[in-house]
Image (tube, helix red, strand yellow):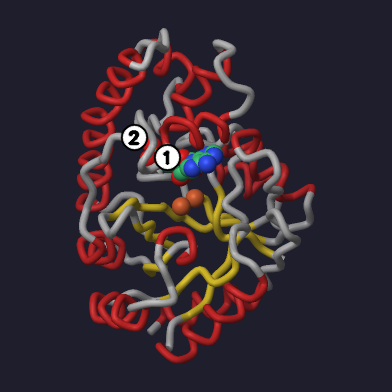
Amino acid sequence: MIDLHVHTTASDGTFSPSEVVKIAKQSNLSAIAITDHDTILGIQEAKEKAEDLGIEVISGVEISADFEIEMHILGYFIDVNNNKLIDNLLLLESFRHQRNPKIVEKLQQLGYNITIDEIIEVAKDSIIGRPHIAQVLVNKGYFNSPKEVFEKLLSFGKPAYVKKDKLKPFEAINILKESGGLAILAHPYKFLYLEEGVENVFEELKLYGLDGIEAIHSEHSDIETKKLIELANRFSFLITGGSDFHGKNKPDIKLGVGRNNIKVDDEILERLKERLKK
Ligand code: AMP
Ligand code: ZN
Ligand code: FE
Ligand code: FE
């Protein structure tokens, strides 16, 4: 079994790249993809550890794109030295630096005692995300869990939500493909309303060069997964799967098996590699 959606401390996971690879080995996984939000800085460490332990690490990234609330696009087998990729990831980081102080300002106005320096201290060298902001509020005793902070303050539509600038989906797909990778729509059921207009969305993404969809994911029900596999077949998309492991930031999601015992077969990776050759 494999897991193609994994976060580390390079973004908002709580385990370092080496620790994640160690957990993957202990969980008997043969391969994992490191897919941090908008950064590739965890990949090298993970690959080095993977070589020691004899498992495979695929270079990946999860890019936030602008669509309705948000759309996440996963890249696999990307060239981490590609300049266009690196430049665009820096741009995405600058969008975060524009947004984060605005969230802090809103939180202060709501009466929470929090500063940007406290967030940087929690995030250390990671790409700063809302989970780090949530962690500061949990550490200060305002809330019991990051999840609670999202539900009350940080999620879309809540009082401390601030929209972040993003790339357009076609830009994200282009960047991933130009860096030699495959582009996959992450967890379609998290942000898309699949009952209406999904054909149009998939059609458009197909035109941009999307290679596949993440049908198997911790936040998809069995029925949703089945429906996505049917849609993938209809659009000739590859299917992929992963847990979206974040360590203690999402404690109910386990590496490799996610929340509801998902299974991602090695064969899925073989099909990605075949597509890459073409
Ligand atoms: P950002 O990239 O800074 O906009 O933060 C988004 C990230 O926050 C997501 O990718 C998740 O990892 C995390 N997140 C979103 N919603 C929740 C939630 N309800 N509970 C815990 N973490 C969440
Ligand atoms: Zn995340
Ligand atoms: Fe995501
Ligand atoms: Fe993710």
> Pointer 1: residues within 10 angstroms few (<14), some, or many (20+)?
some
75, above or below 85, in the image: below
Image coordinates of residue 156 in percent, x first then y, are 37, 43
**Residue in the foreground of this view, choosing between 109 and 175:** 109
Residue at far top of view: 113
Identify the residue at image location x=42%, y=24%: 125
Q: In this view, does 115 lie to the left or right of 86?
A: right
Identify the residue at image location x=35%, y=45%: 38
Ligand 1 within 8 Å of disc 2? The answer is no
Q: Residue 161 carries which label?
A: 2
Q: Is residue 88 left or right of residue 16?
A: left
Residue contact between numbered discs 1 and 2, judged by CB atoms under 8 Å: yes
Image coordinates of residue 266 in percent, x first then y, are 66, 72
Q: Which mark is residue 155?
A: 1
> Pointer 2: residues within 10 angstroms few (<14), some, or many (20+)?
some
Q: Residue 144 carries which label?
A: none
109, above or below 259, in the image: above
Quadrant of the rendered structure where residue 106 is?
top left
Ligand 1 within 8 Å of disc 1? The answer is yes
Ranked by sequence position, the earlier of labels 1 and 2 is: 1
Q: What residue type is labelled 2?
A: Tyr
Judged from the image, the secondary structure of the residue bearing numbered disc 2 is loop
Quadrant of the rendered structure where residue 108 is?
top left
Task: Give the position of the N terminus as an image quadrant.
Answer: bottom right
Q: Can residue 44 be seen in this view?
A: no
Task: Give the position of the C terminus as an image quadrant.
Answer: bottom left
